[in-house]
Amino acid sequence: MAEQEITRHTLSVLVEDIEGIISRVAGMFTRRGYNLISLVSARTEVKGINRLTIVIDASDVIIEQVTKQLNKIIPVIKVVELDESTTVARAIMLVKVAADNSNRPQVVDAVNIFRARIVDVAQESVVVEATGTPGKLKALLAVLEPFGIKELVQSGHVALARGPKSMAPTK
């Protein structure tokens, strides 16, 4: 049997906002050895309902299994795989860059090109905040790397499907 191609998938999962739901979902990934890339939980427009945005590298067969397993968890309301071409997805990144008086103007120019912001300035560094697609954040890092990355933190992705359709339960 030929091996399935591993690709990146984004799942949007509506869950009841109850204690332990994140542990139960993460535990399901751990028990089965699935390659979880990121898991973000946030409130929705409906009180008591949270949206989990899960990014996973897996084959189509594994994604089908993950979806079935998620649907078996009682507080899970709905699971939808988001199509990359019809999804708006963003992450936030904070990066501390070595920047003194000699190179700060170049760092500022690079930051402005990417529509990022400098949120803190110190004598030897600046902290840059950037929001965007994985490709944009990766490209910004490549431009900032020659100046010297001192620290870096990046969130998981949050994502919604484009257009008028909604997966939210009725209020």
Image (cartoon, rainbow, N blue to C red):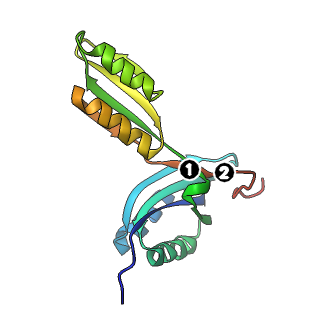
In the image, taking residue 27 as reference, residue 83 lies left or right, namely right
Choose between 56 and 47: the one closer to the eye: 56
Query: Which of 126/137 is in front?
Result: 137
Pinpoint residue 80: horizontal percent, then vertical percent. 60, 64
In the structure shown, which secondary structural element does the residue marked by tag 2 occupy? loop
Where residue 148 sits: x, y (%)? 21, 28
Picture quadrant where residue 136 is located:
top left
Locate the N terminus and report the quarter of the image it occupies.
Answer: bottom left
Q: Quadrant of residue 140?
A: top left
Give the residue type at disc 2. Answer: Arg
Kindly identify the residue that appears in the image at 71 percent across and 51 percent down: 163
Q: Is residue 93 visible?
A: yes
At x 42%, y 28%, the residue is 129
Q: CA distance from mark 2 to mark 1?
A: 9 Å
Q: Position of residue 143 (x, y in %)?
A: 31, 32
Residue at coordinates 57% horizontally, 72% vertically from top-left? 71
In the rendering, at what x and y percent does residue 131 appear?
47, 35
Comparing 2 with 20, the one in front is 2
Q: Which residue is mark 2?
A: 162
The residue wearing badge 1 is 159
* Residue visible at 61% across and 51% down in the picture: 160
